[in-house]
Every structure is written in structure tokens, then in C-alpha cells.
Image: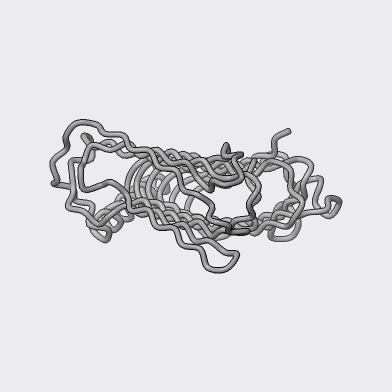
């Protein structure tokens, strides 16, 4: 193993230990049978929604798929630690809704024995902001069909794929803070993208993009009605920006 790779690996292990200790994830709680619970969250008259997701450890799958105008979200939670059923809170004030889904603070379980998955489907027509904080695990965040105005993602330990493609009629601000692992960001070829990438100890690949000063842009940048402004601060691991049809 060369020195650079050894340093990156050591830094990754330190970051994992900090994450595990800092979030109370030296897990000792007992696992049990796998349970599944589904929830439907009604929109409640909101005309825009702020979505806040806090997952300490597990697998998050997020996408559109809710076309019923009266519903905001359909969620399925799969878990085998009783105390890990997430809390779901939704309030509406005036025209604005706030949806918060959070993994409870719990005593822990062996990393190789737990099962914890969130499958969230969101309303495709309601303008929304998305704020996601992840711990350890693998996540797929697909906002291609959503009417997103901003995305704020904090990675933990693991791999994350973020799909920002889709029809964009308004500007979108996206902020990603890297953790320990790999981040893949899918970008449209027909909506302008300007990506600023800084920090981090891993490699950055920008497929289908060109350097513009300290940033990367795609061919549609400056030509489309809407623009995606992407700000990435890397962690330990690789970042891939990929323009797709």
C-alpha cells in the first residue's frame, strides 16, 4: 500500500470512529424480527414543504412517485431494532409545511446484524427544499421528478448517489458535504450546471463537464432557462460528477 493510500485509509478509519462515537453508534441493542411499517403523510394544504431527514445508520432510498395532490409522502420503514422506528413529524403553518423524519437516539447493535431502511416517495408537484444528514450506510437520492428548489446533503460513511436530472424550470441550489466514502452525482445535459468542488482527500471525476476557472460546467451552462448551482466539499473518498442524457 503506498503512503497516500495508507494516509487516506487511516483518515477514513478515524472519521468512522468519530462518527460512531459521536452519534452513539457503538451498537449493543438487541436485534429481533424484521418489521415493516408504512406511513402516508397528507399535504394538509401546504403549497411548499421543507423536508428534513436525519438517519444515523442505514439505507435511504428517496424518489418521486406521489402524484396524489392531497398526499405529501409515502414512507416505508424496515427495521429489526424496536427502538429504531423513526419519528415522523409534519406541521403546516400558513402555506408552508415542514416534514421531519428522524432516527431516534438509541443504544447500539452489532454493525453486521442490524437492518434499517427508509423508502420515501414524495409529491412531484409541490415545491420543496430537501435537507438530509446521513450517518453510515448506502443511499440513493433521486430528485429528478421532484420540484426541488434546494438540496443540502451531509454525508457520513458509505456511498451516496444523487440524481439531479429531470426537467428544471427554476434554479436549484445544491450543497453536498462529503464524509467517508463515494459520492456519485448525476447531472442533466439540457439544464445548465455549475459545480464548485473543494477540499477532500479523494479524486474528483467530472464526466461530460469542462473546467471553468475553479469550477466545472456542462455544455448547457448559460444556455438554459434554469441553472443548477452545485457546491461540493469533499471528504475522504471519491466524487464523480456525471452528465447523462
Residue 237 at x, y percent in the picture: 46, 47
* Figure check: 91 above or below 84: below
Quarter of the image for the N terminus: give it.
top left
Q: Is residue 196 visible?
A: no
Give the x, y percent position of residue 219: 81, 45
Q: Who is closer to the viewer here, 82 or 110? A: 82
On the rendered structure, is 113 left or right of 63? left
Asked whether residue 195 is in view, the answer is: yes
**Residue in the image at 53% along x and 61% along y:** 97
Determine the residue located farthest toward the bottom in the rendered image.
94
Q: Nearer the viewer, residue 145 or 159?
A: 145
Given the current orientation, which residue lies at the most extreme right position? 223
Q: Is residue 141 left or right of residue 187?
A: left
Image quarter in which the C terminus is found: top right
Residue sitting at x 56%, y 43% = 162
Q: Is residue 222 above or below residue 76?
A: below
Position of residue 126 measured from the top left corner of the image (x, y, whole percent): 63, 52
Residue at the spot x=46%, y=62% of the render? 91
Q: Is residue 133 left or right of residue 233?
A: left
Instruction: Examine the image and state in which quarter residue 49 appears.
Output: bottom right
Q: From the viewer's side, name the closer residue of 73 and 170.
A: 73
Q: Nearer the viewer, residue 211 or 169?
A: 169
Where is residue 94, by image quadrant?
A: bottom right
**Residue 181 percent coordinates (x, y):** 43, 45
Amino acid at each position: 500500500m503506498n503512503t497516500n493510500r495508507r494516509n487516506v485509509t487511516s483518515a477514513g478509519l478515524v472519521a468512522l470512529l468519530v462518527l460512531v462515537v459521536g452519534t452513539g453508534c457503538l451498537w449493543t441493542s438487541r436485534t429481533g424480527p424484521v418489521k415493516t411499517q408504512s406511513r402516508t403523510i397528507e399535504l394538509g394544504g401546504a403549497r411548499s414543504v421543507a423536508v428534513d431527514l436525519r438517519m444515523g445508520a442505514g439505507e435511504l432510498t428517496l424518489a418521486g412517485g406521489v402524484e396524489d395532490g392531497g398526499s405529501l409522502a409515502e414512507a416505508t420503514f424496515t427495521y429489526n431494532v424496536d427502538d429504531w422506528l423513526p419519528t415522523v413529524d409534519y406541521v403546516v403553518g400558513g402555506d408552508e409545511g415542514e416534514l421531519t423524519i428522524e432516527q431516534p437516539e438509541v443504544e447500539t447493535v452489532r454493525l453486521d446484524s442490524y437492518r434499517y431502511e427508509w423508502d420515501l416517495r414524495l409529491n412531484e408537484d409541490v415545491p420543496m427544499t430537501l435537507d438530509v444528514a446521513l450517518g453510515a450506510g448506502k443511499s440513493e437520492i433521486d430528485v429528478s421528478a421532484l420540484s426541488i428548489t434546494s438540496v443540502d446533503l451531509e454525508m457520513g460513511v458509505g456511498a451516496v448517489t444523487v440524481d439531479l436530472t429531470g426537467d428544471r424550470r427554476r434554479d436549484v441550489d445544491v450543497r453536498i458535504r462529503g464524509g467517508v466514502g463515494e459520492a456519485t452525482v448525476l447531472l442533466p445535459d439540457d439544464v445548465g450546471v455549475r459545480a464548485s468542488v473543494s477540499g477532500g482527500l479523494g479524486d474528483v471525476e467530472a464526466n461530460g463537464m469542462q473546467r471553468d476557472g475553479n469550477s466545472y460546467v456542462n455544455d448547457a451552462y448559460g444556455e438554459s432557462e434554469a441553472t443548477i448551482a452545485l457546491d461540493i466539499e469533499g471528504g475522504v473518498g471519491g466524487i464523480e460528477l456525471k452528465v447523462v442524457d
